[in-house]
Image (tube, helix red, strand yellow):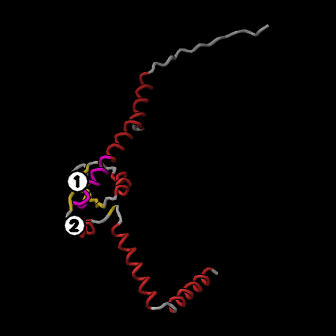
């Protein structure tokens, strides 16, 4: 039943495609190319090769492992960047490549990113740190291990 529906849709697509004119096909191809170019030039994460096509590249070294938190901020500021992990050092470092034209945008994005991470650390302490503090409090508490038994006779 589902296979028949798929076959009918594919045949309908072919029939509609046969009725298309050359002018409509050229218009559709131009629209598709425009959309592909927009997607390629859209801000966000790119490959180093894609960035190199646009101009001179610069790089910044980051040691923070939480690089995923930077991505929404970079998109907000319209930064096109590429990430590379340098595993030759311990701990691994991240290299952020960006176009030289976007230095001001990247500076703004990094300042917001650092402010956000510092604020988050100040507001929310680490769960592990909190657990360690509570363990110390539990270890240091003195327990009263004496038993208090009260015996009383039947009430009359």
Which residue is identified by label 2?
A: 55
153 on left or right of 113: right
Residue drawn at 33 percent across, 52 percent down: 67
Q: Position of residue 15 (x, y in %)?
A: 54, 90
Residue placed most toward the observer, 96 or 138: 96
Question: Residue lying furthest top in this view?
Answer: 156
Query: Any magenta on residue 108?
Result: yes
Q: Which residue occupies the foreground of this view, 121 or 32?
A: 32
The label on residue 89 is none
Outermost residue, right direction? Answer: 156
In the rendered structure, does residue 125 fall within the stretch colored magenta? no
Q: Check the picture and name the quadrant holding the N terminus.
A: bottom right
User: Does residue 49 lie above or below 148 as drawn?
Assistant: below
The residue range painted magenta reads 98-111
Q: Which mark lies nearer to you, 2 or 1?
A: 2
Q: Are marks 2 and 1 in contact (CB under 8 Å)?
A: no
101 vs 112, left or right, is: left
Badge 2 density bin: few <14, some 14–19, many ≥20, Cα 10 Å: few
Q: Residue at x 31, y 64 (%)?
A: 46
In which quadrant is the C terminus drawn?
top right
Q: Residue at x 38, y 54 (%)?
A: 72
Q: Secondary structure at mark 2?
A: loop
* Residue 3 placement (x, y as % from top left): 59, 82
Q: Main secondary structure of the magenta part?
A: helix
Q: CA distance from mark 2 to mark 1?
A: 17 Å
Residue at position x 21%, y 66% in the image? 55
Q: Label 1's element?
A: strand
Q: Which residue is mark 1?
A: 60
Q: Is residue 20 left or right of residue 90?
A: right
Q: Earlier in the sequence, mark 2 or mark 1?
A: 2
């Amino acid at each position: 039943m589902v296979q028949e529906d798929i076959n009918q849709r594919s045949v309908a697509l072919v029939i509609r495609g046969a009725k298309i004119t050359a002018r409509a096909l050229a218009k559709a191809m131009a629209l598709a190319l425009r959309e592909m170019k927009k997607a390629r030039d859209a801000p966000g994460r790119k490959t180093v090769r894609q960035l190199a096509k646009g101009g001179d590249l610069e790089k910044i070294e980051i040691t923070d492992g939480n690089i995923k938190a930077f991505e929404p901020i970079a998109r907000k500021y319209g930064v096109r960047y590429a990430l590379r992990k340098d595993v030759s050092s311990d701990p691994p470092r991240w290299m952020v490549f960006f176009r030289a034209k976007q230095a001001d945008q990247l500076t703004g994005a990094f300042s917001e990113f650092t402010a956000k991470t510092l604020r988050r650390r100040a507001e929310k302490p680490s769960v592990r740190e909190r657990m360690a503090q509570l363990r110390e409090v539990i270890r240091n508490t003195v327990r009263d291990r004496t038993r208090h038994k009260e015996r009383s006779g039947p009430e009359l």
